[in-house]
Image (spheres, coloured by chain):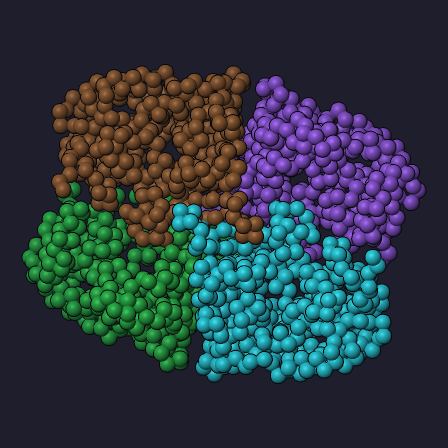
Chain colours: A purple, B brown, C green, D cyan
């Protein structure tokens, strides 16, 4: 059974560039697939750095201009791991060049920009996906299955949080490698686009569309040095964002994100309360799912801590043995696996650009609401 | 050292009537005080039931008309454990009769009504307190101490939830004993006055006043049988209430309460994120306090689970030995202890009616905001 | 319904004297019973202290000689809360005087002494019980019910620990009030009689008799000042004791106790592994029971954290509402409740002296094994 | 910076063959090293299976006779992933051929056999290591660092457990792929060599040598079908093994392992109680370390749950960002990293064969003690 190569052109070499490269390198060791990603070229403006990156990961070549990468005939798929403000231009050009696209989240700077990207990939007919990797944490995939199996019944509440604490120190700069997420020009927004985007993607996947939202944002540290200019500048991003809302299925939404929650590094949690059962998940212990089923006998009813490492659990038969946990990086491996299976079957893995666009319009409504202090309807995609 | 008797007249014999009676009966066994509560009279309209209650708890006499109780010379203090819509009338009459008053929470049906009660007790100069008992859970009292000691630094976030699941079944009636909390005429509101009132009281105590709020409420089960009339009637209470807001100290508020969170019986939680440290507490494990201190060494920094049972911890030297937990009922014992010490010292224990009135005005702003879908400023007391 | 008084004569006023007095004072407030304990007399050698104790708890009279107390006609039941080395003499005398006896654990200094006590109470035909209070923690009682209901199937393992850390400091004296448990003359042994006795009692109750054991003990601090003499003396107690063994049902036993486990105040835990299900309990969160049922569906199988506060749970319908926990002291209230119901029904509550004697013989085998480093059979009662 | 290749010859393709191969494939992506493992050849008797394995992992060639593999000039290091009863023969031959050896645990079937292996590698002067991978779980490595830094003070207790439940079903066969661990001929012993070996290795590393032990074993299912013969045969392994003992530093040991603990898949836990601090770790949440420091202030003292994902934590700076956990497989990556660094520096990574031999002699003493029911001294290596 010889594998069909899928030649990857990677743009960017940061945190996500590493996470994706690792996924491409590992996926065929653990899953039986028809395709095999080939690390064909890595691309970034800094030649020395991209060369070091390519050598470390085994990319066969490097480029310093993404337009040249896109123009190469030997590249099948473009992986976009650059700051948010560059996604649209690159993705639209890649689509026009007939490349498949795997784009980091959030898809775009805002809904209208994302809509253009959706148009571009759909017009070109190229396979496309957005790296909302948390859908493929086995415990989260299991949550989806339990909901689809009807275990929860009518849903009353969906609440999610994404709490970090790494920007409390006012000496953290804005802009630059590692801190572009604090620069509104590059990131478009703060925790909303960076963190809430994940929460919203999972929520829409598990619980359907949001109808309307009401939000509040705050910037606790008003000025920071800019890494590029060296000057103290006004901070344009949101440090914290809280919103409430209503899903179309009638359940209530409660969301919060911040980078000022001392003690939490990357505490993404969600909880869903249904008529018959509830689910809770926590990124800090991502290999567990908490599940409460009211139909259990009254004497022994309790929250079950499911150690999601059994062969029956999503994706887990392909890893180690029961009881041995996997980690963060594996969610990316699973996404590549599903993307490649989608290519083989013709049934594209989610979230496509169109699917991910929904999150973008929720974010727009959230930020508009925070700005004018009113409830906003969410634009339907 | 002979103890000075404090003759109690208790109105009501339900859940809170029992909790308070137990506190009066126990307090002198564990604390050295100048006063000793004497269970002088219990009062309720149903003579048979109040007699049974009085016999069980050792009340010396019974009354079936609270006005008679208030008129009795041998009563020093009136304890109000009746539905919310009766608090004001009883309290104002009791104050006019010169009685001390210990009133169940919430103080009143709304802010203006509560203001009249405050005026009454202050005009009469009678000692008064409201039973926001959670302030006296040792772990919560410890949280207050840590904040007052400056351990947290600047506060960024305060979030609280109170989740229950006992009204999901639509067959639960509204009105009547045990379910008057579902009857808007008796309760005034639903989870906001019943549950969020606790969350708000703690928050104002720990973090100061709220400046403004924006809220959303929902009634999931629109009609229920009324226990009194036997008829299906529209439900007037809020089944769920979520609100966000800003404290005067600049921190953000995120609050939620519901009786539709499957799996949670009485899950009151709060978390405070400060610049240097964070605190988390959970009523389902009320004897623990979670504490994270960023100043701990980087290698061993982590959330500490403090088992609040050591002699150094608030109130605990008077109970058992380290490691042995107390429960829910002890918060009431501590409130009586502090009330009696306040009487002895002349420095009244908190929350007085005036202190508790602040919560009432937050609730008013919350419910108005939910009604008109706008942000509301909180009236300053 | 007038209650029948049961006149209590309490000997001792320490930690257990308080715990039992509280139970007598509270039990009728929460349970409907035919009997009502009356605090008739408290007895101890130190007249000033016993008077203060009597006043605090409402004992009607005091004695300074336990023989006089036993001789009193107005006393129905003797409660023995004195150091272990006095249990036998008092209990035998009380039995001969026809008094009911409620004796603190451990029953005796050793098996043969305990056997004489059993003979005495059985010859006299007086109701008797030993205060192994942990059987009446609702979560533990629930564990018993689940086992009796056959939920676990064949048992493979039973393991228990009781870990404390209060004697690590070598300055803690031996002998004297509060520290007589370190004086071998008063206590008979160290952690084995004090802590393992609890673990063994629960184990025999839940899992049947032990057949044989092999043990190891250690005394980490070899000399301590004696509180009575003020002199440095050799420590005669065991600071730590570990043993393994086999139950008659074929399951394996693993037990450990120590007062040198930094970080644990009173961490009594047990776990039972059965063919179909397992149970875990922990005194530091005594209101929870952990339960794993292999028959749950493979996808959602997990340890359930049961918050043992529902009306269906043992004893809990008589306390507050679901979600609100009780604490350590309530196990004593439940024991009094069951003792009084046993009196009324003629079916005595467990553990009687005879039932508790089994633990004594396990302890003897454990200590003998530690001394001669061999396996020992447990004497059958 | 060109990397020096280290040509690996892998024998075996099971669970461990995959875990090691993954480590070789990943290590250079995450760590800057002087060596780079090259997957030169995979070896096993079943040609079809070893070819499939080689293709999946990118081994350049295959062998079906390990003697041929060892004879190859292009192989630098032999990785032994075969059943325990083959380790000695292969390792001794490999040493004689001058190959480096990376041998799966346990090193040997028993101490004397292991001693011969130690002699062989030391005579040949070849680098050697045993795959006791848990030393390189970052939380465990952190525990070692805290102990070495003197945080715990005098040690009183070390307890460890390794609990599984996969052989409760009597239909699980003995012998054959995946179940050779139940066949005494292949495995040498049951849970002792398989699971306790891990616990002992960690313990000796963290707490020094054991002086003497006393053990108990049990085989719950007495007969099982043999996968090779298809016949019901007596089971020769230990299903469960419990032992106690004393470390040379005076602390007490309490160890237990079983495959009959319903609800636990691979629950390896250890706890160390020192004079000043205690440590607890749990394989089911391997990314956390529980730490209690008595020197914390009395009010806020508690067990700290350290999320071992910060850049300061061992190995973690090379993975993702704080808050994002790694999993089981990464312990093998770390072992390869340390082995390669040891090669480069000439300071071999632990545990070498000699270091791992200590565990073997503890196991011998444990099994002898279980057989003759006496205490046994541990042979010093």
Instruction: Examine the rendering and report whether any part of residue D199 can be seen.
Output: no
Looking at the rendered image, the quarter that the N terminus of chain B falls into is top left
Q: Quadrant of residue A147?
A: top right
In the image, is residue D90 above or below residue A14? below
Tally of numbered tags: 0
Q: Is residue D163 above or below residue C4?
A: below
Q: Percent x, y for residue B60?
A: 14, 34
- Give the quadrant of residue D59: bottom right
- Residue A85 found in image quarter: top right
Q: Nearer the viewer, residue C87 or C223?
A: C223
The residue positioned 79% from the left and 41% from the top of the image is A12
The structure residue drawn at horizontal position 73% and vertical position 73%, both measured from the top left corner, is D127
Residue D280 screen position, x and y as percent: 51, 58
Q: Residue at x 46, y 28 (%)?
A: B239
**In the figure, is residue C151 to the left or right of A109?**
left
In the rendered image, the vertical position of residue C242 relative to residue B285, given as above or below? below
Apparent side of residue C196 relative to residue A224 in the rendered image (left or right):
left
Can I make out residue B112 in this image?
A: yes
Q: Residue at x 40, y 49 (%)?
A: D298
Residue B168 in percent (x, y) is at 46, 34
Task: Report whether A167 appears left or right of B41.
Answer: right
Pinpoint residue C253: horizontal percent, then vertical percent: 43, 69
Q: Which quarter of the image is occupied by the C terminus of chain B?
A: top left
């Amino acid at each position: 059974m010889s594998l069909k190569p899928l030649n990857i052109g990677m743009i960017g070499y940061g945190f996500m560039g590493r996470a994706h490269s690792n996924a491409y390198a590992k996926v065929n060791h653990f899953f039986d697939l028809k395709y095999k990603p080939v690390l064909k070229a890595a691309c970034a403006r800094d030649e020395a750095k991209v060369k070091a990156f390519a050598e470390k990961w085994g990319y066969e070549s490097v480029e310093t201009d993404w337009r040249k990468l896109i123009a190469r005939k030997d590249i099948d798929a473009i992986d976009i791991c650059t700051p948010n403000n560059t996604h649209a231009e690159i993705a639209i050009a890649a689509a026009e060049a007939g490349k498949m696209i795997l784009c980091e989240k959030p898809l775009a700077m805002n809904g209208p920009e994302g809509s253009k990207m959706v148009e571009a990939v759909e017009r070109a007919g190229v396979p496309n996906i957005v790296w909302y990797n948390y859908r493929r944490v086995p415990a989260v995939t299991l949550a989806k299955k339990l909901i689809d199996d009807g275990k929860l019944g009518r849903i009353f509440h969906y609440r999610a949080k994404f709490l970090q604490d790494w920007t409390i120190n006012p000496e953290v700069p804005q802009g630059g490698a590692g801190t572009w997420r604090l620069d509104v020009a590059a990131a478009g927004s703060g925790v909303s686009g960076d963190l809430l985007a994940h929460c919203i993607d999972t929520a829409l996947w598990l619980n359907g569309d949001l109808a309307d939202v009401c939000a509040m944002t705050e910037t606790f540290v008003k000025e920071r040095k800019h890494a590029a200019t060296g000057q103290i500048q006004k901070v344009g991003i949101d440090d914290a964002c809280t919103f409430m809302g209503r899903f179309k299925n009638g359940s209530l939404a409660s969301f919060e994100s911040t980078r000022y929650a001392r003690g939490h590094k990357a505490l993404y949690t969600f909880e869903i309360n249904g008529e018959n059962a509830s689910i809770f998940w926590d990124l800090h212990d991502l290999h567990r799912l908490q599940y409460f089923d009211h139909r259990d006998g009254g004497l022994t009813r309790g929250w079950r801590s499911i150690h999601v490492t059994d062969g029956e659990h999503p994706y887990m038969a392909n890893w180690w043995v029961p009881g041995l946990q996997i980690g963060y990086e594996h969610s990316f491996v699973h996404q590549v696996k599903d993307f490649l299976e989608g290519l083989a079957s013709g049934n594209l893995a989610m979230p496509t650009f169109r699917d991910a666009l929904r999150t973008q319009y929720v974010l727009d409504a959230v930020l508009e609401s925070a700005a004018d202090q009113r409830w906003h309807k969410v634009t339907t995609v």
